[in-house]
Image (cartoon, grey):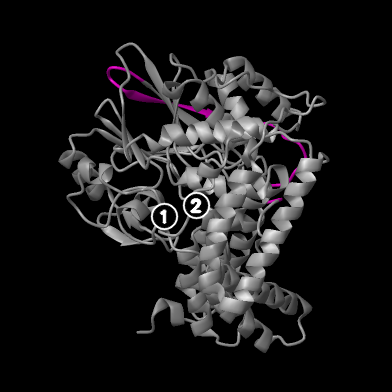
């Protein structure tokens, strides 16, 4: 008896369902589109278009691992189908795997030699790979790396760029760059980078030396001395709402003071909420500053009496990430117990380079801040426990049973996220609706079932897991028999998903979660991903 998918009578029905899936995709209903493409594939798995289209929908949901699997299947079905390679290359690109992406775009060019779009994307990918190779060549090991933060004294920053001393600094910096470039030619990249590290720190220390005041014409928010006050934070937020910048001298102060506090925290932070008090947990904000302000309007500003935990992914994609991170850091400086901050998978160099934060920081602040934020992100704690009962983490749980809270506390987090292990899984993993564990739809971390959640809670005498990391239509989702809640706080994510945002208020002592949802608010006409990697924007 022939299988259902080989029955030619199913082909017209499969096409009808594919057309429905395409309409769902156009309406930004990507989850629904995936379900419909799946139905079409079940009727006719020999159509490469269905697999490639489903791969594209997975990409829109940031499920890059699943996108690569589907695109690979499309290629298997039809090795000459250029969109299979195109979709897989785009997914590799989104994961920062430029070398793998290059191979696929080379294949697209081979199949479509006269396609100008294929030619353009191949050239851009070749540039990205060349840049990556150059960065690898000049990189230094962790043991040789020197902290940019240790070379900066924010008290002395604020010189006018037209002052004679500043012009001298610029000239000497140029000489130093030329000197290092010459060393690369003479002694090779390996030796030159070691000298560059020493020169860079020495130059940085000297660059920020010397007494200077903030320019007289600066009318924005100012910090008087070393204490960040509520009045300053309010003024700064008002300036940000009006698209005004904060002076770099105060930005340095906020970031450096935050770094000092975060460095002193453990990888797993215990939070105590007294009886009769409340505590708010927010999910991903992703650079949506005006929605962050709306959260504070709905739920009050952070304070000792109204504390928050922001659960990672503060930056990237949204084009007001600098405003978001400086606001959160400023509240941390104002009152450390008013706001807790956890690391997300987007608090990393690789993600920031691709999804916009790095470019935005260069545009609004400076190159020095790019390195500084990268250092501070490595200081962010990985997880929090509220009143020894609620475990809060950005991503999810683990590939092995028996992980204890003490194991999380023992993680050496002061590094870029690895591609495997406990730290990686805390930042990247996702829940799944069926038991056990499975491969990650993202291509990093894993998927875990209700049984995994239940055992982790039992092993650690906990009641609930709260995590973020995923867009949800209602801003949240309760899963795993009520033992796991996903909360996502970026409504209408990337100005196209149409989702609500949410936050969770816990009241002590029972810590029953009260979910509050909200819709997106207007923002200035700066599109998401405005500062993202140029090559990636070509695929949006």
Please provide percent x and percent y for residue 83.
62, 76
Q: Name the residue under label 1.
A: 417
Please provide percent x and percent y for residue 429.
37, 53
Q: Do residues under tags 2 and 1 come within 8 Å of each other at their CB atoms?
A: yes
Task: Determine the image quadrant of residue 286.
Answer: top right
Mark seen at residue 195: none
Task: Determine the image quadrant of residue 225.
Answer: top right
The residues bearing labels 2 and 1 have C-alpha atoms spaced at a distance of 7 Å
Disc 2 element: loop
Q: Give the range drawn in magenta.
A: 507-530
- Please count the marks in the image: 2
Mark seen at residue 348: 2
Circle 2 Cα neighbour tier, 10 Å, few/some/many (<14 / 14–19 / ≥20): many
Q: In which quarter of the image is the C terminus?
A: bottom right
* Nearer to the camera, 237 or 476: 237
Q: Main secondary structure of the magenta part?
A: loop
472 to 23, vertically: above or below: above
Query: Residue at the location (32% across, 37% down)?
Result: 266
Q: Does the magenta stretch include residue 521?
A: yes
């Amino acid at each position: 008896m022939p299988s259902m998918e080989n029955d030619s009578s199913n082909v017209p029905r499969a096409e009808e369902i594919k057309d429905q899936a395409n309409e769902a995709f156009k309406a930004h209903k990507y989850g629904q589109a995936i379900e419909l493409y799946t139905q079409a594939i079940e009727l006719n798995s020999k159509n490469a278009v269905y697999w490639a289209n489903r791969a594209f929908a997975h990409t829109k949901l940031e499920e890059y691992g699943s996108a690569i699997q589907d695109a690979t299947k499309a290629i298997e079905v039809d090795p000459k189908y250029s969109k299979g390679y195109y979709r897989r290359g785009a997914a590799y690109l989104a994961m920062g795997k430029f070398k793998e992406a290059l191979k696929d775009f080379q294949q697209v060019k081979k199949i479509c030699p006269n396609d100008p779009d294929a030619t353009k994307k191949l050239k851009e990918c070749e540039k990205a790979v060349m840049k990556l190779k150059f960065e690898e060549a000049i990189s230094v090991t962790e043991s040789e790396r020197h902290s940019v933060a240790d070379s900066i004294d924010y008290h002395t920053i604020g010189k006018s760029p037209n002052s004679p001393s500043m012009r001298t600094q610029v000239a000497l910096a140029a000489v130093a760059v030329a000197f290092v470039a010459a060393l690369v030619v003479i002694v090779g990249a390996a030796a030159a980078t070691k000298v560059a590290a020493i020169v860079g720190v020495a130059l940085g220390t000297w660059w920020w030396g010397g007494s200077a005041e903030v320019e007289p014409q600066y009318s924005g928010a100012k910090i008087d001395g070393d204490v960040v006050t509520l009045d300053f934070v309010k003024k700064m937020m008002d300036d940000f709402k009006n698209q005004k910048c904060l002076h770099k001298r105060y930005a340095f102060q906020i970031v450096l003071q935050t770094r000092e506090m975060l460095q002193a925290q453990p990888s797993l932070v215990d939070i105590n909420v007294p009886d009769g008090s409340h505590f708010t947990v927010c999910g991903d904000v992703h650079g949506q500053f005006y929605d962050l302000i709306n959260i504070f309007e709905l739920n009050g500003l952070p304070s000792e009496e109204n504390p928050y935990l922001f659960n990672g992914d503060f930056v990237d994609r949204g084009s007001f990430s600098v405003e978001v991170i400086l606001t959160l850091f400023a509240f941390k400086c104002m009152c450390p117990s008013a706001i807790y901050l956890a690391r997300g998978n987007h608090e990393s160099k690789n993600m920031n380079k691709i999804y916009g934060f790095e470019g935005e920081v260069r545009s609004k602040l400076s190159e020095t801040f790019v390195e500084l934020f990268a250092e501070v992100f490595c200081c962010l704690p990985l997880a929090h426990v509220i009143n020894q009962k609620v475990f809060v983490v950005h991503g999810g749980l683990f590939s092995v049973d028996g992980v204890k809270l003490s194991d999380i506390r023992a993680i050496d987090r002061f590094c870029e996220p690895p591609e495997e292990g406990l730290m990686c899984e805390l930042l990247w993993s996702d829940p799944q609706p069926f038991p056990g564990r499975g491969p990650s739809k993202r291509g990093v971390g894993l998927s875990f079932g209700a049984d995994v959640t239940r055992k982790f809670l039992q092993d650690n005498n906990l009641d609930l897991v709260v995590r973020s990391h995923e867009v949800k239509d209602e801003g949240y989702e309760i899963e795993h028999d009520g033992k796991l809640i996903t909360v996502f706080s970026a409504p209408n994510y990337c100005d196209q998903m149409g989702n609500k945002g949410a936050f969770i208020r816990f009241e002590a002592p029972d810590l029953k979660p009260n979910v509050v949802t909200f819709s997106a608010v207007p923002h200035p006409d700066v599109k998401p991903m405005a500062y993202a990697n140029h090559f990636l924007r070509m695929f949006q």
